[in-house]
Amino acid sequence: MDAFELARLQFAVTTIFHFFFVPLSIGLAFITAIMETAWVRTKNPEYLQMTKFWGKLFLINFALGVVTGIVQEFQFGMNWSAYSRFVGDIFGAPLAIEGLAAFFLESTFIGLWIFGWTRLSPRTHAATMWIVAFGTLLSAFFILAANAWMQHPVGYELNPETGRAELNDFFALMTNITAWSHFGHTILAALATGGMFVIGVSAWHLRRKPDSPVFRRSMTVALVVSLFASLGVAFSGHFQAQLVAKQQPMKTASAEALWETEQGAGFSLFAVGDVENGRNHINLQLPHLLSVLTTNTWNGEVQGINDVQAEYEERYGPGSYIPVVGVIYWTFRLMVGAGMLMILVSLVGLWYVRRGTLPKAIWFLRLAPLAIALPYLANSTGWIMTEMGRQPWVVFGVMLTRDAVSGSVGVGFVLTTLIGFTIIYGLLSIIDVYLLSRYARSEPPTVTEPSAERALVY
Amino acid sequence: MEQGYLNLESLWFALIGVLWIGYFFLEGFDFGVGVLLPFLGKDEVDRRIMVNTIGPVWDGNEVWLIVAGGATFAAFPEWYATLFSGFYLALFLILAALIFRGVAFEFRGKDRHPEWKRWWDRAIFWGSAIPALLWGVAFGNILRGVPIDANKEFVGSFFDLLNPYALFTGVTSLLLFTLHGAVFLTLKTDTELQIRARRIARTLAVPATLAVLGFLTWTFFNARENDGIVPGVIPIGALVAVAAVEWLLREKLDGWAFLATGLSIVLITATMFLNLYPRVMPSSLSAANDLTIWNASSTHYTLTVMTWVALIFTPIVLLYQGWTYWVFRKRIRRADVEEGVERSRDVEGFVPPPENPGGEAPSPA
């Protein structure tokens, strides 16, 4: 492997790992805030116990999101300095705004929330968690706006004099339709992640203590959040897929292993492809469904990989513009499949809750903890598909990933930090899973009000 | 090429300077607390008190760095690209240190095993000492100039960064931050711990003052050979401030002593930025290769947008960060803690669960 491939691998490792923590942080921030607000409103101590229990898990998870986030901010300059020089005029702005508007907010108010139980009034204290949750939204928006610009660059011009892309319309950057469709899909997925996590952990407890009021209430809140969020993910995903079909037809074609342009294209369920010759050996399809999904018409045209490739060669010059089709095809299916299962889990759970027989539904309580894996699978595969589907571009149609890497950083350096980050992150994930599973299985606190004066937290 | 001070490039250079000043002032003392943890924390209660003095604020302090990085990316992409790719391994070490340190604060209290705490305490010490040293080394190198070619690429090696001047700058920052942390602990603790903190602060004040004197003199002679601004009263103020710390502590004027260490950090950082101006990263190969605020900056359009963003958000940030410090202004008293330790066991309920909750072995992976 050369420095370029190692740098890509490093970006994949650090970013996927970072995004393991982010969605749960966003989801749990909202769920914790909802619970604390319920406590402030009703003064029912069960809600306080819920707040404390889930808040603790939120904090363990949040810490890792924060520290892995610093790497994200720095690695563009470290490994992708050519990219940074070329697009810094545009790409740097949302990153800086994210820090100024969102990170300060999150970090300061999380401190107030952790340490402020007795120094702030219950109302103000609950408000700090809402502010943290709002901060996560801001943060998500700005970083997604930056990513959306790489997927669908807007509001810029290429300056031949400086040889770089330069911003000329900030408003276009902020209203990029790709950014907002990313945002809706990602935030809903984060809420679904939080919901599924709470469902799984609550189920584990309810199987052992069917009467636990804390977990029965938590389960209900989470099932509702998760149902609405995962349905929303599906709808926003549909919208996003139609947008991708327009903006990056190559990504759509790869996700469907569709080699030739077709009218009335079928939705592939299982395909074995022959990438060399640009065709499939096996392809099980639901007829017409792909055309219906992407164009809303029975016989709509969907472009195939070979045709897009020919078109791009004409427009951008010789070279391959085809991503790794097998990866795009299967990550898309895994994401959609996991998402469907999440809807199913929420529906089944709510059905039992309505009938009041959830504690007796042992099979559900047994399986639900395993469902925690679903949102993680969907989140990771979704991003792998989005990012690898854009290749060979780092900025779609503007800059190739190969041209984005740091010229001055040797292969030995990249390898060193790749190994370093992998070891550090591996270690941290072991510790995190240990702590999370341990605290997730602990009894909720028996508090009835915030303690009188608790001098120390850490 | 534009000249004069009233332009967006100069404004953003100043703003990034202010972000670094804020970062070094704030994270400076929490680095110091981390470095002092093994020396001042005689027992577990001491160590918990120390960690909790910075508990509510360290994360917000660290964001100053992230915003400094982001602002550099947005306003001076060439500076960001050259600096971060050039100081590659040093930055990796800093990142690794900050990762372990951040997690350590949150995780050290989550398991009662003494070995668990000991490992996280090590992470806090090294995670604080390494960046406190390396930020100095990094800034020493920026001031001194590093090999940058005509394509704005760093062409030196890792060992070029380990020159005497940069290392001396690193030692200075480590000493100064540790002193800053010691004075902070004097302000935030009581009884034995406070006495020890004041004693170590007074001991550290002398070498810290000498280091500042050495750094400023060395920088002065370097600076005369370049075309940066050689500020007069500012470095002298930095020296006077740090020199006064020992006396202020002897007189038990702890609040003033904290202001003095803080002021010294502020003025030294200001000295560095003034000395650089209008360059952001001088090249040791040729002055023609210097990265300056002119050839490293974003377009006027981007700088204008970012100026509006900064004008809107900065006052809000300062307001609520200030409010946090007000909320947590109280000293942490050992008596409260010892009582609290007992009470937190029964009432607060966040005692880690038994080894095998639910009768199943905890699965660490």
Image (cartoon, rainbow, N blue to C red):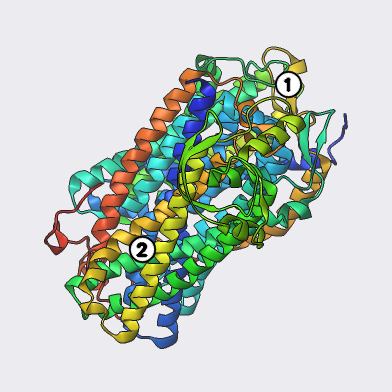
Q: Would residue A13 appear left or right of B137 to someone viewing this image?
A: left
In the depicted structure, whether residue B324 falls above or below residue B47 = below
Relative to B9, B123 lies left or right = left
Q: Is residue B277 visible?
A: no
Q: Position of residue A372 (x, y in %)?
A: 34, 59
Q: Which residue matches tag 2?
A: A197
Q: Residues within 10 Å of mark 2 (few under 14, many from 20)?
A: many
Q: Which residue appears at 46% of the width and 53% of the height?
A: A335
Q: Is residue B66 above or below residue B350?
A: above
Which structural element holds mark 1?
Answer: loop
Q: Which residue is mark 1?
A: B290
Q: Are marks 1 and 2 on the same chain?
A: no
Q: Position of residue B239 (x, y in %)?
A: 59, 34
Work out whether residue A286 or residue A446 is closer to the camera in this orientation and state it: A286
At a point 51% along the width and 73% down the height, the residue shown is: A127
For residue A21, side relative to residue A359 (left or right) = right
Residue drawn at 84 percent across, 29 percent down? A160
Most foreground residue, A51 or B160? A51
- Between B34 and A404, the residue placed more toward the observer is A404
The reply to whether residue A143 is visible in this rendering is: yes
Q: Which quadrant is the C terminus of chain A positioned in?
A: bottom left
Residue type at the position of mark 1 = Asp
Front residue (pair B28, B103): B103
As drawn, the label of residue B186 is none
In the image, residue A393 lies at what x, y percent?
Answer: 64, 35
Tell me if mark 1 has few (under 14), some (14-19) or many (20+) residues whose alpha carbon lies within 10 angstroms of its own. many
Q: Quadrant of residue A239?
A: bottom right
Q: Distance from label 1 to label 2 (Cα)?
A: 52 Å
Image-quadrant location for residue B314: bottom right
